Every structure is written in C-alpha cells, then in structure tokens.
Amino acid sequence: GAVLFYRISASVLARFPNASVDSRMVITRYIANGNVRAAALQMQPYGGGLSVARSSLAYGYLGPVLVAAVIALLSAAFCWLLIDPRETAPHSMAPTGESIAVSVD
C-alpha cells in the first residue's frame, strides 16, 4: 500500500507541482481507491482530467505488480532448484510400488 500511494503521489506531484498539499493528497487518495472520475474533478482547476487520473493509477500499480512478479519468479526458481522430483512422484510410482486408491462416491 505504501509503495502504491508513494508512486501515485509522485505522479500527481510531477503533473501538478502548483497544487496545494491538501489537493494533491485528496487526488492521490481518490486515484488509489480507483475513483478516477472524482480525481479528475479535483484536477480540473489545475488543468488535469480523466486521462491524467488513469495514467497516474496505472503508474501507481506498476510498482507493486512488478514486485509481485519478481517474487513469483524467484519462488518458482527456488522451488525448481530445491525440490527433488522423486519427492513429488505420483503415488503409483511410490518406492513401495503401492498405489493409493481413493473412492470418490
């Protein structure tokens, strides 16, 4: 959440450096909540609109999504390196040769 708000706030500050701190905070909150129409209404006195709100929303979510993708990639790589395929063999290939049958009635 903090990364999301920071990135949206930075985007709003870059677009509207002359806006008051309170206005930028309200705009940032609206954008982070996904209420881009309300944010666009708040931006109108400063020359902003709906497209600015949408681009700020996209820029804000880019960071957390990228971090999540990197974590998922690293997790998959560690699993591939650390888990032995024999540990996850199907029951029919278990070392004892016994198959586990489960009734699905």
Image (cartoon, rainbow, N blue to C red):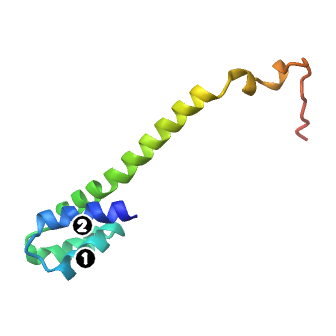
Label 1: few (<14), some (14–19) or many (≥20) C-alpha neighbours in 10 Å: some
CA distance for labels 1 and 2: 7 Å
In the picture of the structure, the residue carrying the numbered disc 2 is 9
- x and y percentages locating residue 86 in the rendered image: 74, 21
Can residue 50 be seen in this snapshot? no
Amino acid at pointer 1 = Met
Measuring from the top left, give residue 53's x and y in whole percent: 22, 64
Q: Position of residue 60 (x, y in %)?
A: 30, 58
Q: Is residue 76 above or below residue 33?
A: above
Q: Nearer the viewer, residue 27 or 68?
A: 68
The answer to whether the residue labelled 1 contacts the one labelled 2, judged by CB atoms less than 8 Å apart, is yes
Residue at 11% in and 69% down = 16
Give the side of residue 44 with respect to residue 2, left or right.
left
**Residue at screen point 20% across, 75% down:** 24
Residue highlighted by disc 1:
25
Question: Could you tell me the amino acid type at mark 2?
Answer: Ser
